[in-house]
């Protein structure tokens, strides 16, 4: 599954270059506020606030449409409990691939607002370990893969010619509905390339 997701990620990064203009690249951090591993709604180790970091690129297909692939790495979530003669621990992590289309509602000098729709593939992995005093450890590993539909809104704020700040809020509609919020920074590649040309490099 990891190889498939990696191949898909490279494809959505490289394929748009043949028919769209690569304009920005960036990074973000945020939270997935309602993800439950394997849809376990009533477990004692719910991942209701799952932090992540992500990288994304923006391709301008034709104004006002942008195509935005994104790769997200979820920070490992650790839940553990120590009892008198027994302890156990869950470690859950994952990564996701999103491919969204942005529709820019307004394009001003310093602010752009957009709506988005797209697809999400989330692969998560959980390791469970338990230990009894005087016994060997028991380890169990499981994984979960889900496909979802992204719906949301966001905005770009032009701070300088070289970079923008952005925010985004979206829902992921799958077997469970997740709410995802993120903030980040985008480098304006068009401006940087134009500066290189002007300088003669």
Image (tube, helix red, strand yellow):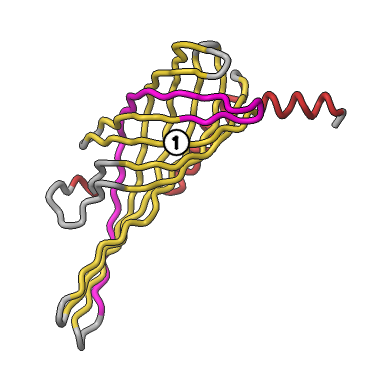
What residue lies at 34% left-to-right and 28% top-to-bottom?
A: 150
Q: Closer to the camera, 67 or 184?
A: 184
Count neighbours of disc 1 (C-alpha within 10 A) and say few if under 14, some if 14 to 19, many if 20 or more: some
Q: Where is residue 62 in the image (x, y as percent from the top left)?
A: 55, 12
Q: Where is residue 113 in the image (x, y as percent from the top left)?
A: 45, 18
Q: Is residue 142 magenta?
A: yes
Give the total of numbered labels: 1
Q: Name the residue under label 1.
A: 183
Q: Quadrant of residue 151?
A: top left
Q: Foreground: 176 or 112?
A: 112
Image quarter for residue 77? bottom left
Q: Is residue 77 magenta?
A: no
Would you say 122 lies left or right of 131 here? right
Depth check: give the residue in front, 99 or 108: 108
- From the viewer's perspective, is residue 42 above or below residue 189? below
Tell me which residue sits at (61%, 32%) in the image.
187
Tell me if 170 is positioned left or right of 104 in this view.
left
Quarter of the rendering occupied by the C terminus: top right
For image coordinates 54% across by 13% down, the residue present is 108
Q: Which residue is at a point 49% across and 15% down the rendered structure image? A: 65
Q: x and y percent of residue 54 in the render?
A: 47, 42
- The region drawn magenta spans 137-166
Q: How far across and how far down the image is residue 106, in percent? A: 47, 11
Q: What secondary structure is found at the residue carrying circle 1?
A: strand
Residue extending furthest left? Answer: 42
Q: Quadrant of residue 79?
A: bottom left
Left or right side of 126 for 106: right
Q: Which residue lies furthest to the bottom in this view?
A: 134
Q: Is the magenta stretch mostly helix, strand or loop?
A: strand
Q: In this view, does 175 lie above or below 141?
A: above
């Amino acid at each position: 599954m990891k190889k498939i997701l990696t191949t898909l990620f490279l494809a959505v990064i490289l394929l748009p270059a043949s028919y769209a203009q690569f304009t920005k690249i960036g990074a973000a951090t945020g939270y997935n506020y309602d993800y439950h591993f394997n849809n376990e709604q009533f477990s004692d180790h719910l991942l209701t606030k799952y932090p992540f970091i992500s990288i994304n690129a923006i391709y301008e297909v034709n104004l006002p449409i942008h195509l935005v692939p994104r790769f997200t790495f979820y920070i490992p979530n650790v839940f553990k409990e120590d009892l008198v003669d027994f302890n156990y621990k869950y470690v859950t992590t994952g990564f996701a691939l999103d491919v969204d289309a942005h529709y820019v509602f307004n394009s001003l000098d310093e602010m752009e607002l957009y709506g988005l729709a797209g697809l999400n593939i989330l692969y998560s992995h959980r390791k469970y370990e338990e230990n009894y005093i005087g016994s060997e450890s028991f380890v169990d590993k499981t994984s979960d893969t889900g496909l979802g539909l992204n719906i949301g809104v966001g905005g770009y704020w032009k701070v300088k010619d070289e970079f923008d700040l952005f925010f985004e809020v979206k829902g992921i509609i799958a077997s469970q509905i997740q709410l995802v919020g993120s903030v980040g920074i985008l480098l304006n590649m068009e401006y940087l390339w134009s500066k290189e040309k002007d300088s003669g490099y």
